[in-house]
Amino acid sequence: MKNEDKTKEKLIKELVELHRRITELEKLESHRKKAEMENEERRLYLEAVLADAPDAIITMDAQHKIIMCNQVAEKLFGYSKKETIGKNIDDLVTGADKFEEAKLYSKQVLAGENIPTIETVRYRKDGTPVDVVMAGSPILIGNELVGAVAVYTDITKRKQMEVEIKKYSRELEHKIEELRKVNDELSQYTYAVSHDLRAPLRALNNYCRFLQEDCSNSLDDIGQEYIQGIAENVWHMEELVTDLLEYSIIGRTRTKITNVNVGKLLARLVSQLHPDENVEITLPKEDIIIQAKEIQMEQIFSNLLSNAFKFNKSDNPHIIVGYKETNNTWEFSIKDNGIGISPKYFDKIFGIFQRLHTQEEYEGTGIGLAIVKKAVDQHSGTIWVESTSGKGSIFTFTLPKIKAEQLDQKTG
């Protein structure tokens, strides 16, 4: 009986141990399945991330054999996943001209180093080259290298755009050079015509004066009126030619930049313009020394001041010349209480031969403000107008300051 009891006890112990082992195995199997499920979920997540990535991504093992590639990589290089898995990446996408470069980068990444971003060329399955930006990085677990990842960005369109931009830049430079030559020729033509016209105009003016002085008794009132009309038109034509010549000269002659005393220049110009006694003129009190081309500064102020006098019907005309200095510029303004300008004409008035009034209303050639604009442009400055019809105008221009060490080098 005792032996039977011992046998039963032994059997029970074995059954308990077996049950324990089975339970442990079941737990292990459960953990294994859970781990497999988690790994599968991570794999699917990684594949989803890679699929949505905008760049071609290829992962490799420690022997540089491809483990995985995303759809962008398939499309970029023309290989299916089946054709890439287990293959050496350099054998697939590297041409003979880039093989040494690829070997160097493979050695670098397999040594656990990052491959810096570079622009290079790789090849598609059909042998066509593709411009890419490439970067690579080793995959380490602890200190153990288990693989590498390579990322390729297709820059073919960017390279094509760069080629197109260079092409258009060359064409633009060519067009600009052609335009410059045309402008030079036009300027020379204008100068030559204006210069050559002055002599016959003076002759016409002299003949009109001779007729008036020597033949006045032989002419009736109508004849006298005709002679006077010819003289006035000849005078206007000579004035027009003079202004046109002045406009064409700006920028053609190499005028040296010097120190200009603007205060003295303004005082001299006001004296030369002979304004009426009822005209009040306010000039800056202090001496203003700037670096500029004196002849062109005289043209700028002379035309702006004469316009301020001319286009003014006020009983008490008042012209104010303002001045302001900043770190980088000089700013001058000429303010008047004259007839003003409608804002719709602000851009038009600086064009050559642009007149807003008839010759009978206000004398002039329509070139004055064009001369001012061209002279300001020659100094790399800016000019603008603020005005309202009937309420006066403010013409403002700025000139960039020139450093002392540049003064001797600046000519135009």
Image (cartoon, grey):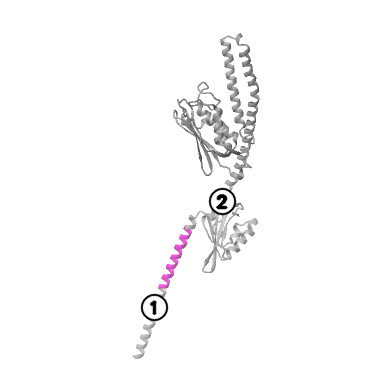
Q: Position of residue 162 (x, y in %)?
A: 58, 47
> Residue at 54% of width from left, 69% of height from top?
144
Would you name the residue on which mark 1 appears? 20
- Does residue 134 sit above or below 352 in this rendering? below
Q: Quadrant of residue 250?
A: top right
Q: In the rendered image, which quarter contains the N terminus? A: bottom left
In reply to whether residue 297 is colored magenta, the answer given is no
Q: CA distance from mark 1 to mark 2?
A: 62 Å
Q: Quadrant of residue 205?
A: top right
Residue 372 appears in view: no
| Nearer to us in this view, 225 or 68 | 225
Q: Residue furthest left?
A: 1
Question: Which range is magenta?
Answer: 27-48
- Does residue 170 sit above or below 232 in this rendering? below
Residue type for callout 2: Ile
| Nearer to us in this view, 74 or 139 | 139
- Does residue 380 sit above or below 197 in this rendering? below
Element under disc 1: helix
Q: Name the dominant secondary structure of the magenta segment.
A: helix
Q: In the rendered image, which quarter contains the C terminus? A: top right
Residue type for callout 1: Arg
Would you name the residue on which mark 2 appears? 155
In reply to whether residue 39 is colored magenta, the answer given is yes
- Does residue 280 sit above or below 84 in this rendering? above
User: Are there few (<14), some (14-19), or many (20+) residues within 10 Å of tag 2?
Assistant: some
Q: Quadrant of residue 149?
A: bottom right
Q: Position of residue 395 (x, y in %)?
A: 50, 33
